[in-house]
Amino acid sequence: MKLIIAVIQDKDSNRLSNALVENNFQATKLASTGGFLKAGNTTFLIGVKDEEVEDVLGIIQGNCKAREQLVAPVSPMGGNADSYVPYPVEVQVGGATVFIMPVEQFEKF
C-alpha cells in the first residue's frame, strides 16, 4: 500500500477531487499555503494499493496543469534593494508536487 501526497494549486482542486471520485478513489483534502508565492494550495492525501499508484498519478497529471501567472513582487523590507524588481514578473504556477510513501499498516474504524 502507498500514501500519495499531492500538493496542487487551489484552482485545480475541484477538478481533481471530482476525477478521483469518478474513478472510485477516496482522498482527504487539506488547505495548505505555498512558501514561494504565499498562495493557497490544496494537499490531497490518497491511500492506494501498490498497483493503483500509476492510475492515480495519471489522474493527477491530467487534472493539474501548469500555467503562467504574473506576480507582483514584494518590496524589500530591510533587504538588499539592488536586486529588487519593481514590476510584475511571469512565473510558472500550478501542476502538482507529488510524494509517494510506503504504508506499513492501514486501519479504518
Image (tube, grey):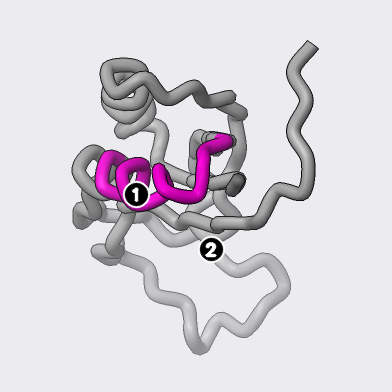
| Amino acid type at image mark 1 | Leu
Q: Where 54 sits versus 19, above or below? A: below
Is 31 left or right of 57, judged from the image as shown? right
Reading the image, the residue beneath label 2 is: 75
Q: Quadrant of residue 1?
A: top right
Image spot of residue 26 (x, y percent) = 49, 22
- Percent of width and height locating residue 53: 42, 49
Corner quadrant of residue 86: bottom left
Depth check, mark 1 against mark 2: the one in front is 1
Residue name at image x 38 percent, y 28 percent: 13
Residue 78 appears in the rendering: yes
Residue at the spot 53% in from the left edge and 60% down from the top edge? 36
The amino acid sitting under disc 2 is Ser
- How far, Cα to Cα, is label 1 from label 2? 38 Å
The quarter holding residue 43 reads: top right
Foreground pick, 54 / 51: 51
Q: Mark 1 Cα within 10 Å, few/some/many (few <14, many 20+)?
A: some
Vertical order, 79 against 54 (above or below): below
